[in-house]
Image: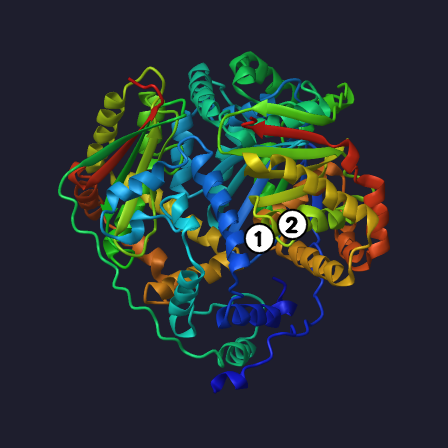
Amino acid sequence: MREQQLLDRYTPPAAGPLKKVSLPPYEQTALDNGLPVYLLPYGTAEVVQLQMVYRAGTGYQPRAGLASYTARMMQEGTRRHSSLEIAQKLDEYGAWLGNDTTEQALAMTLTTLSSHLEKVLPLFQEVLESPAFPEREFDLMKARNLQKLQVQEMKTSFQARRYFGHYLFGKNHPYGMHLGREELMTLDLPQIIQYYQQYVHAGNAALLVVGNFEEAPLMQQLNQLFGQQPMPDTPAPVSQVLRAELVSQNGRRYHQLPGMQATLRLGHLGFRREHPDYYPMQVVNTILGGYFGSRLMKNIREEKGYTYGIYSAWVSLKYHGFLVVQTDVGNEYIEATISEVKKEMQALRQQPVPPDELELVKNYLLGKSISQRETPFQMAEILRASVMNGISFEEMDRKFEIFQQISAEDILALSQKYLQPDSLLEVVVGEMK
Amino acid sequence: MPSNQLETAFWLESDRMLELNFSQEKLDIQKSVVIEEFKQRYLNQPYGDAHLKLRQLHFQVHPYQWATIGKEISHIEEATLDEVREFFFGYYAPNNATLVVAGDVEPARVLELAHKWFGDIPRRKLKKHPIPQEPPQGEARSMRVQGDVPLEAVYKMYHVPAHTERAYYLTDILTDILSNGKSSRLFQVMVKEKQLSPQVNAFSWGMHDPGAVSIDGRVVKGKTIEAYETALQEVLDSLQELTEEELQRVKNKLEATFVMQKTTILNKAMGLAISDSLGDPALVNTTAEIYRAISLEEVKQAAATYFAPSNCSTLYYLPKNHA
């Protein structure tokens, strides 16, 4: 029989040594007026991404939606061109203009083939510095998004995210705010224009350039476009988080929404991004629910079949952080799932992680760290996080050593210190009998 | 995965191709997981089952009428261990597979490992199920469903040629003209100018056999389905006045997309695998050329042919208690 000649497939082959992929060096410089510029050549593809980042992310907004709608409205027309004309001009070059907001950043992003960079840059400058904020465009955007939100609000996952923030940080805390129909209804254009005037200017910005570009001609053009206007002499913005009152509640919170499944969001407060245990806790979280082979996934999906997927995250923002476990389960599995999540958190606090599992998770995290550095667009994200959170590339690279050196004893101690299965906030949105 | 683990990938994949751990207990748990997946994706979302239903109207012969997951929960519940085993051995065979490896590797080493890990897996007798092809539709079809949804919605599917046909690329570029970005026709007319829809999307399903292009939209409260459909047909008819300029803009966007896609190894590997499944691995390098060569007349002709009402199946998704 042929089968007797089969290779032994019980023992995995040995892996070679892992090549460490350090973050590449970047150049930090400034335009004539002092606007900081970060230049990071990366990758072989002939593409380049520019991000103008303003310290005007969701952490700075006094009400939900302000940061993201300011960014969106900047793309809806300038004093010289309508929103359609801008889109068509970008299309001529196959270039993209995008916007997004994080806790710290309001970012406007231009992505283009390197060969067209010079031609599209003036339009980028126009969008950033002379948006017209047309009333009609705002009304249309608001109207269609209200209709989209009406659909979103019927989803258990959407409602669970809203309530989790409300209970964990407070409804009016920047980290707990949520943009639903109710909040969008009262957002108006004057608030947006005021936010733009207050936060979106050269004195509160940095420019990031990642990909393939020629430095000298680019810097010359950037100086012409962005480096001549004087810097407004305004004080650095203060995060609303520092002014907000944090009211955190735990315990079971039910919200009724008819359907076949419930969304569960379970968690508690954690710590800020600068905390020295940030990377070690990423290892703890990975074991708990951070990857497809995690304990929660093995238990609740692979052994019990309660869910299609269950994940946890240890999230650290600038001033606070939190643990969140999220899953969609059949309504009949709600109690059993919550109880199993608590058991898995307890187990991490009680028994050391077996060597095989620890080895696996370390390899997983190291491999993931490398694959997260693949494209210029990923590098732009990393550079932005570094600039906006004040975390250096050296500090970011330290995770390789941390992941390699962390022991089962460390993980036990970290779990005991930070995981709190007995005082979880348990948000349940679904159909309760 | 990191390239130091190259052989681990070969080990895992070859073990998986050799044989799975077929046990009733494993199957029962996976069935339960997939039932939860079915609920999460299709039943517990507003409009979640729209395409499940529309596919059945659109494809009356071809198995594309079912999503991979099945038509309904009973399809999952009733799967037996024997059926699963038979399917596995009938299709997951070395003589029915292509292996693509991309990244930081030496070709000679990859070939060596391929021989080592896959060379000893016996060839299998493949299941030769001829796949019935969909006949021309002939006349417009429609169906109505009601559900717990806030807005009326209109889902349309049009028959388009197989991925191996040049005309497939024409229908693909048509979806870009219709709904890729803010300058696209559906966004400009349906969403902004006439405010009939908060959101309308055209997309190609990318099916291998003759398949489908979809145009899905919701209807703004207070506007009628009739007004929506009339305006949509006007947009489709207006494709006959497409200009070289507009076509060129769409092509430029595609051109840039190709370059950006190639920044990841995964996209490179997938592009090669899909090209191979279409019968020509070199397509991975020539697809951009196909799009570049598309002429204005061809696009207009394709629009007239494939967006004909007689080639379309429509599903109307209505809020419950709708009159």
Q: Please indicate whether residue A11 sits to the left or right of residue A50 in the image.
A: right
What amino acid type should be assigned to the residue bearing mark 2?
Asn
Residue A328 falls in image quadrant: top right
In 3D space, how far apart are the residues under numbered discs 1 and 2 (Cα atoms)? 34 Å
**Could you say where residue B105 lies in the image, as x and y percent from the top left?**
57, 71
Position of A179 relative to B156 (above/below): above
- Does residue A12 lie above or below B193 as drawn? below
Q: Chain of mark 2?
A: A
Residue A291 visible in the current orientation: no
| Mark 1, secondary structure of its residue | loop
| Residue B222, image x, y percentages | 33, 15
- Residue beneath the point at 41% across and 69% down: B89
- Is disc 1 surrounded by few (<14), some (14 to 19) or many (20+) residues within 10 Å? many
Label 1, on which residue? A375
Name which of mark 1 and mark 2 comes first in the sequence: 2
* Residue under disc 1 on the same chain as residue under disc 2: yes
Q: How many marks?
A: 2
Front residue (pair A391, B118): B118
Instruction: Name the chain letter of the residue that bears numbered label 1.
Output: A
Image coordinates of residue B30 in percent, x first then y, are: 52, 53
Q: Nearer the viewer, residue A154 or A340?
A: A340
Residue at 21% over, 32% down: B238
Q: Nearer the viewer, mark 1 or mark 2?
A: 2
Tag on residue B107?
A: none
Q: Quadrant of the C terminus of chain A?
A: top right
Q: Position of residue A355 (x, y in %)?
A: 78, 62
Kind of residue at badge 1: Thr
| Left or right: residue A297 compared with residue B100 | right
Read off the residue under disc 2.
A299
Residue pictured at 63% horizontal, 49% vertical: A297
Q: Is residue B283 something one can see in this rendering? A: yes
